[in-house]
Image: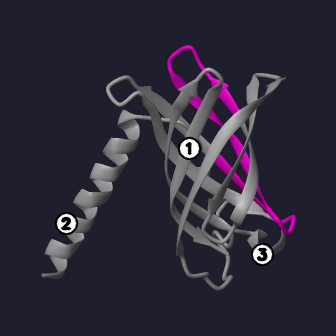
Amino acid sequence: MKNRQTIKRGTVHTTAVGLAALAALAVGLVIPGLVQGAGSSAPATKQKPFSAVYVFSTYVGKEGPYEVWDGTGTGTFVGNSWTESKVHDSDTHKNKGFQTIWTTKGDSLSLYAESAYDATTDSWVGSYWILGGTGPFAGASGSGITVAAATSFSPLVITASLEGWISF
């Protein structure tokens, strides 16, 4: 029975990863060594479910190779919050970038993501990794799936969601 549960969990994970590869916006590359306590005897923190939804309606402009967007939304542990996303969109319909979420208390959570465009769903799907933050999120880690799509084209408005885990 234990082996069947492991196989089922592996199948679900594989399916989620496959879905992430199909669509695409976002936030996600595995960066070895960034997870707090990696290779140390630091006590492990418990992973908690993390989800957030942000609406990006303000285009700030270019910052080097990045397109900078501001948005607002709400999320687990961050509540009502403001976010800035710096996205580098390649000609191959793949993007990567950084996102910072600020809480109303001034604490921040930093993420990195990668995603790809899926014409069949007209959205961007990918993965994100939590890189840390300030306040209670100092040393935070975690990862998950991100999905984003344009909800309006005039003016351009993008809605993005994050679903995954966080440890802090």
Q: Is residue 49 magenta?
A: no
Q: Main secondary structure of the magenta part?
A: strand
Q: For the point 18% across and 81% down, which residue is it?
A: 2
Can you tell which mark lies on residue 30?
Answer: none
Q: Quadrant of the C terminus?
A: bottom right
Is residue 163 depicted above or below 21 in this figure? Answer: below
Q: Amino acid at mark 1?
A: Ala
Residue wearing tag 1: 160
Label 2 close to label 3 by CB (< 8 Å): no
- The correct choice, above or below, for 161 with respect to 65 in the image is below
Q: Quadrant of residue 37?
A: bottom right
Name the mark on residue 136.
3
- According to the image, label 2 marks what residue? 7
| Residue 149 seen in the current view | yes
- Tell me the SS state at disc 2: helix
Quadrant housing the N terminus: bottom left
Please provide percent x and percent y for residue 51.
54, 62
Q: Residue at x 19, y 66 (%)?
A: 7
Q: Residues within 10 Å of mark 3 (few under 14, many from 20)?
A: few
